[in-house]
Amino acid sequence: MPPSTDLEFLDRIEPLFSAKQIQDRVKSMAEELSEYFGDKELVLVVVLRGSLVFAVDLLRYMTIYPEVEFLSASSYGNNLLPGNTVEIYMRPDLDLEGKELLVVEDIVDTGQTLRQIAARLDTMNPTSVRYISMLYKRLPNQANWPVDWFGFEIPDLFVIGYGLDYRQKYRNLPWIGYLPQ
Ligand code: 5GP
């Protein structure tokens, strides 16, 4: 049994996408990506930690056989501020030169994380870089980062589940919900 504090917290969460809706959407994106990348030498670049669950499902539904690499990105301070630093960690001997990359994100909010990942990957001379995010936040009066594919567009809400955390927990929920203000 989970502690009652977890149950009380989850009781406040409003559902947004069911496990079935998510799986159907991920499967259809995996099919589209398999067709799109075809026989290219693809590398999935999984952005830890939030996109772990999405990346695993995407990979399992794919009918092509990409390589998989990881990087981790963490932002400090208020990431709504432009110019805020995002720390990017990757293994030091990671060689992406001449590779076709698909960067896998959980959610694009301000786009600051992807903007800085893109700048870093550009210095590594890949052949191409494409971006996919499970969720894409539509922000009022603000352009974020243009991804090539996304699962669902959402309004400016704080969401949890399917890899997305609240204070590092609840990433393993198979559905996505939001915390009401
Ligand atoms: P961005 O740099 O696009 O503003 O934010 C990207 C990162 O912030 C995401 O990869 C995610 O880790 C975190 N983030 C942004 N919005 C949410 C949200 O609604 N819920 C959770 N759990 N994390 C979020």
Image (cartoon, helix red, strand yellow):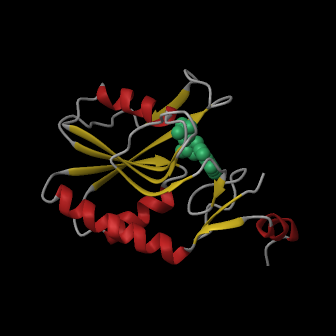
Does the image show residue 95?
yes
- Pick the quarter of the image with the N terminus: bottom right
Position of residue 150 measured from the top left corner of the image (x, y, whole percent): 41, 54
Relative placement, left or right, of 116 versus 81 is left
Tell which residue pokes out farthest to the front in this image.
141
Position of residue 168 measured from the top left corner of the image (x, y, whole percent): 68, 52
Vertical placement of residue 75 versus 83, above or below: below
Position of residue 93 measured from the top left corner of the image (x, y, whole percent): 33, 34
Relative placement, left or right, of 170 versus 11 is left
Determine the quadrant in which ligand 1 lies: top right
* Count of number-bearing discs: 0
Tell which residue pokes out farthest to the left in this image.
39
Name the residue located 70 percent from the left edge and 53 percent from the top edge.
166
Position of residue 6 measured from the top left corner of the image (x, y, whole percent): 80, 66
**Residue 127: which quarter of the image?**
top left
Name the residue located 22 percent from the left edge and 39 percent from the top edge.
128
Viewer-closest of 85 and 35: 35
Relative placement, left or right, of 142 versus 91 is right
Vertical placement of residue 124 versus 54, above or below: above
**Residue 110: which quarter of the image?**
top right
Does the image show residue 73?
no
Viewer-closest of 43 and 28: 28
**Residue 33: which quarter of the image?**
bottom left
Relative placement, left or right, of 50 versus 9 is left
Vertical placement of residue 170 versus 47, above or below: below
Name the residue located 64 percent from the left edge and 55 percent from the top edge.
159
Name the residue located 54 percent from the left edge and 50 percent from the top edge.
49
